[in-house]
Image (cartoon, rainbow, N blue to C red):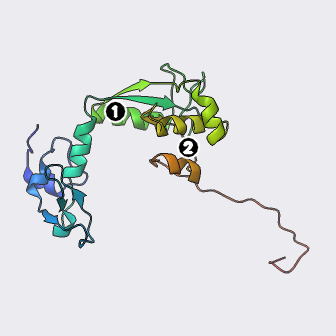
């Protein structure tokens, strides 16, 4: 594990420098009673039935971030890539969704690949089993986006890459991580012959 080169860089810089995986040792924290603490707190990874909080002491929690990042290193994730039209917002491959090749482009692809490099994990492009498609259709509908979410919810994939619409049904079966958002516009015809805006 790397040591912090300068403690002040580690405790005052947000986000924390990548070489500073022990900066949580320099920050104030305490154990709290989770039933009486309104501040952000987490279960201890060392002691059962104990919760710790940096927020209760007015500090940022870098321990959770560091431990999450450390848990990614060296892992291989099974990932489904879903092609958006053109890929200008999400992911695109001329061979279509779940293609296993190096032709994937788009900001979602770039984001995930950069995250893998910085997090020290590998991505194994994976297509959900074909037999799962019928189950996904019965639950969701006929899209490859639904199939990918369905495969993640059952553990056949670890996550999906693409530009997804987050809806109630999709978010009810798996966690959605938003990396971008687009406004939704309602375009409607206005009847100009009426003077009453409610009619």
Q: In this view, does 77 lie above or below 69?
A: above
Q: Is residue 167 visible to the viewer in this orientation of the structure?
A: no
Q: In this view, does 188 lie above or below 38?
A: above
Q: Position of residue 114 (x, y in %)?
A: 36, 34
Q: Which residue is drawn at 17% across and 66% down?
A: 32
Q: Residue at x 44, y 34 (%)?
A: 155
Query: Residue under circle 2?
Result: 164
Query: Residue under circle 1?
Result: 116
Q: In this view, does 114 lie above or below 61?
A: above
**Badge 2 element:** loop
Is 93 displayed left or right of 197 in the figure?
Answer: left
Q: Which mark is residue 16?
A: none
Q: Residue at x 19, y 51 (%)?
A: 63
Q: In which quarter of the image is residue 73?
A: top left
Is 175 displayed left or right of 150 in the figure?
Answer: left
Q: Where is residue 27 in the image (x, y as percent from the top left)?
A: 12, 59
Q: Where is residue 51 in the image (x, y as percent from the top left)?
A: 19, 60
Closer to us: 167 or 110: 167
Q: Which residue is drawn at 8% across and 44% down?
A: 5
Closer to us: 79 or 92: 79
Is 173 displayed left or right of 29 in the figure?
Answer: right
Looking at this view, name the residue that lies furthest to the right: 193
């Amino acid at each position: 594990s790397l040591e912090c080169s300068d403690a002040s860089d580690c405790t005052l810089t947000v986000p924390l420098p990548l070489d500073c995986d022990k900066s949580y040792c320099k920050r104030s924290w305490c154990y709290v009673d989770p039933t009486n603490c309104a501040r952000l707190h987490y279960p201890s990874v060392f002691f059962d039935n104990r919760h710790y909080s940096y927020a209760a002491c007015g500090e940022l929690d870098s321990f959770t971030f560091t431990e999450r990042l450390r848990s990614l290193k060296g892992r291989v994730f099974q990932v489904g890539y879903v092609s958006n039209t053109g890929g200008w917002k999400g992911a695109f491959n001329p061979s279509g969704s779940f293609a296993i090749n190096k032709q994937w482009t788009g900001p979602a692809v770039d984001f995930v690949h950069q995250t893998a490099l910085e997090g020290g994990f590998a991505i194994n492009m994976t297509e959900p089993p074909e037999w799962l498609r019928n189950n996904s259709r019965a639950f969701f509908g006929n899209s490859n986006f639904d199939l990918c979410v369905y495969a993640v919810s059952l553990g056949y994939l670890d996550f999906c890459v693409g530009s997804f619409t987050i809806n109630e049904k999709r978010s009810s079966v798996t966690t959605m991580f938003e990396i971008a958002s687009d406004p939704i516009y309602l375009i409607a015809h206005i009847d100009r012959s009426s003077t009453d805006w409610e009619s």
